[in-house]
Amino acid sequence: MKTPPGLQALIDDGVIDAVLRPLKSGKEAAVYVVRSGDEVRCAKVYKDMAQRSFQQRTQYQEGRKVRGSREARAIGKSSKYGRKQQEVAWKNTEVEALYQLREAGMRVPEPFGYFHGVLVMELVTDAEGFSAPRLGEVELTPQQARDYHAVLIRQVVLMLCCGLIHGDLSPYNVLVAADGPIVIDFPQVVSAAGNNAARSMLLRDVNNLTAYFGRWAPELLDTWYGEEMWKLFEAGELLPGTVLTGKFTPDARTVDLDSVREAINEARQEALIRQQGREAAAEDD
Ligand SMILES: Nc1ncnc2c1ncn2[C@@H]1O[C@H](COP(=O)(O)OP(=O)(O)OP(=O)(O)O)[C@@H](O)[C@H]1O
Ligand SMILES: [Mg+2]
């Protein structure tokens, strides 16, 4: 195929030898299947900020939430230098997270480096060797749903033990590899300690998984893994090997119903924005 402009520099530098085919163009990046020597890998070319939807620039990097159009406009007007810095930070975050999380034993694609704004990583494949489907595209048996849920809860724990929260964990950012689910797509990861919205993002990530797997295994809908792991994390007691129960008794004295309601509404609103972004990206394909 004709080499996409974002990948020519990698060919010139000998990082990759050929671009085999486009894999998927999402709202934030275009992913290609490439060949490096004898290896088939994938290359994620980030779209420039102007092409991406506004939500991630505002919500994640600030350490606090900014949602209104007034704030979005203000950020849009920020200095050229500021924008450039944000852009660099956004693109670097994912490769750094992949190295750190893999080192910590999490199931993520193996990174092979970051060159000219492009992330080169392992192509995750299914049992037949084809690029792996997204979790949201596969039918599951109740037992598979329970097994995958357990694997992914463990992944969220490992991440949290590294001080990180995915922030956009959904059936669209999990691939089903031959040996089980693998989490992808990390540019928006947030620091669990440095972000005021960390707890609600963690709960949203876990709830997305639970709600999805609950379609096949409804008993999962009565679990509270997010709350349980957050409480342990806050107390400094969460370890990679910590066994969770899924049970959680909220402390009646500290439950602030208004903020719970607010968090739920925010999660709904953000899910809607994301869904619209995905639909818009799908229409562009
Ligand atoms: N390492 C990989 N192996 C196989 N497929 C991959 C890999 N990374 C990404 N993909 C495919 O490319 C798609 C887009 O990748 P990713 O989610 O990282 O980017 P994105 O632009 O944020 O996408 P979206 O906006 O759809 O979430 C994934 O849904 C998946 O189908
Ligand atoms: Mg994605």
Image: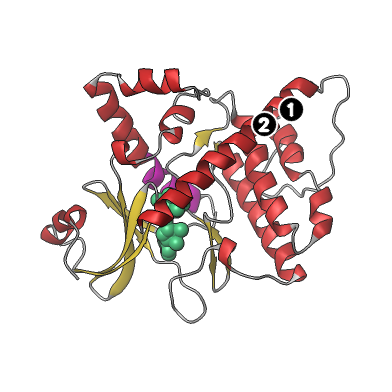
Which residue is rendered at x = 65% and y = 48% of the image? 208
Q: Which mark is residue 279?
A: none
What is the CA distance from the residue labelled 1 to the residue labelled 2? 6 Å
Q: Is mark 1 within 8 Å of ligand 1?
A: no
Amino acid carrying mark 2 in the image: Asn
Residue picked out by circle 1: 261
The location of residue 103, given as percent across then percent down, is 48, 51
Which residue is rendered at x = 49% and y = 22% of the image? 68
Query: Residue lying furthest front in this view?
Result: 283
Question: What's the magenta region?
Answer: 93-102
On screen, 215 above or below 69?
below
- Camera-side residue: 56 or 203? 56
Residue picked out by circle 2: 265
Query: Residue lying furthest bottom in this view?
Result: 128
Amino acid carrying mark 1 in the image: Arg
The location of residue 140, given as percent across then percent down, is 68, 70
In the rendered image, residue 99 lying in the magenta stretch gets the answer yes
Query: Residue lying furthest left in this view?
Result: 12
